Image (cartoon, grey):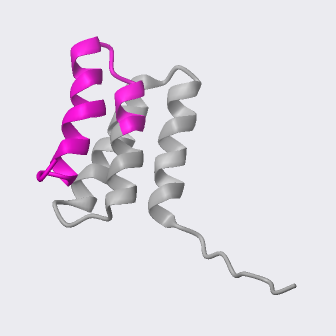
Amino acid sequence: MSETSVRPDPVMAEIGRGMELGQRGERDAAREVFAGVWDRLGADGDPFHICALAHSMADVQDDPREELVWDLGRVVWIRPDK
């Protein structure tokens, strides 16, 4: 059986940190973490990271309309042809 090497993903680690904050009820802090990651990813960010980030950011929105923007709008942003 071959062993596969898994390298840490610092972007996912930061998203995970934001998710932990959100789960503890620290929604403002989570949004700050996610906004920082969003700023660093930019338009050319990895689509996997953008999707994970957008859905995580959606979960910590106070306004359901903003949640929908993050859940749908950002995903469309990474796939403008769809």
- Position above or below: 68 against 8: above
**Main SS of residues in magenta:** helix
Which is more toward the observer, 61 or 67?
A: 67
Tally of marks: 0
Quadrant hosting residue 6: bottom right
List x then y, in percent, for residue 39.
22, 54
The magenta region covers 55-82
The answer to whether 67 appears left or right of 59 in the picture is left
- Taking the spot 53% from the left edge, 45% from the top edge, the residue there is 17
Q: Quadrant of the N terminus?
A: bottom right
- Taking the spot 35% from the left edge, 48% from the top edge, the residue there is 51
List x then y, in percent, for residue 18.
47, 40
Judged from this view, the residue extending furthest toward the front is 82
Quadrant hosting residue 3: bottom right
- Position above or below: 6 against 60: below
Quadrant hosting residue 24: top right
Judged from this view, the residue extending furthest toward the left is 81
List x then y, in percent, for residue 60.
40, 25
Q: Is residue 54 magenta?
A: no
Which is more toward the observer, 53 or 30?
A: 53
Judged from this view, the residue extending furthest toward the right is 1
Which is more toward the observer, 68 or 31?
A: 68
List x then y, in percent, for residue 70.
26, 32
The answer to whether 29 appears left or right of 79 in the picture is right
- Taking the spot 53% from the left edge, 20% from the top edge, the residue there is 25
- Position above or below: 68 against 10: above
Q: Is residue 60 magenta?
A: yes
- Taking the spot 39% from the left edge, 58% from the top edge, the residue there is 48
The answer to whether 35 appears left or right of 24 in the picture is left
